[in-house]
Image: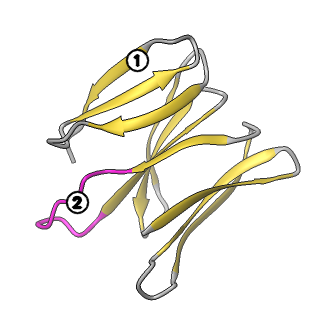
Amino acid sequence: MLAVDTQLNAKSGIRVWDIKTGAHLLNKSGFEAYWTRALTFAPNNKSNPIEYLFSGDEKGNLRIWKIPSGESTIHVNYPTGIQTLAFSPNGKYLAVALWDTTIQILRWTR
């Protein structure tokens, strides 16, 4: 899959495509933040075909999206913008790097 951020009329969004078929899997827009700053997919779990996309924006919104349904399963708001997101090599932890130079470590379970 390929995920990109979008921006239209000072509101951000995200889009996801299946790179093998070109199918458009997710299209969300109209977020209050000007840009979605960080996107990452949860590590693949072959026993569970549902994929998850994590998005972080400059307003501090961390969202977890279920692909392909487009359902936002979790929404957390940090007091400062999100700079980047990264999973640990074992896929159990998500690092959320914030604009205030702190890093939050979250445990991820499906």
Residue 62 to residue 14: above or below: above
Identity of the residue drawn at 49% across and 33% down: 84
Q: Amino acid at mark 2?
A: Asn
Colour scheme shown? secondary structure
In 3D space, how far apart are the residues under numbered discs 2 and 1 (Cα atoms)? 23 Å
- Residue furthest left in the image: 47
Of marks 2 and 1, which one's residue comes earlier in the chain?
2
Q: Is residue 30 left or right of residue 68?
A: right
Identity of the residue drawn at 43% across and 36% down: 85
Rendering coords of residue 24 (x, y %): 55, 78
Residue to which mark 2 is pinned: 44
Residue 64 to residue 19: above or below: above
Which stretch did the figure color magenta? 41-50
Q: Is residue 35 left or right of residue 64?
A: right
Q: Is residue 99 left or right of residue 31?
A: left
Q: Amino acid at mark 1?
A: Ile
Q: Residues within 10 Å of mark 1 (few under 14, many from 20)?
A: some
Identity of the residue drawn at 70% across and 41% down: 35
Rendering coords of residue 96 (x, y %): 42, 27
Residue to which mark 1 is pinned: 103
| Dominant secondary structure (helix, strand or loop) of the stretch shown in magenta | loop
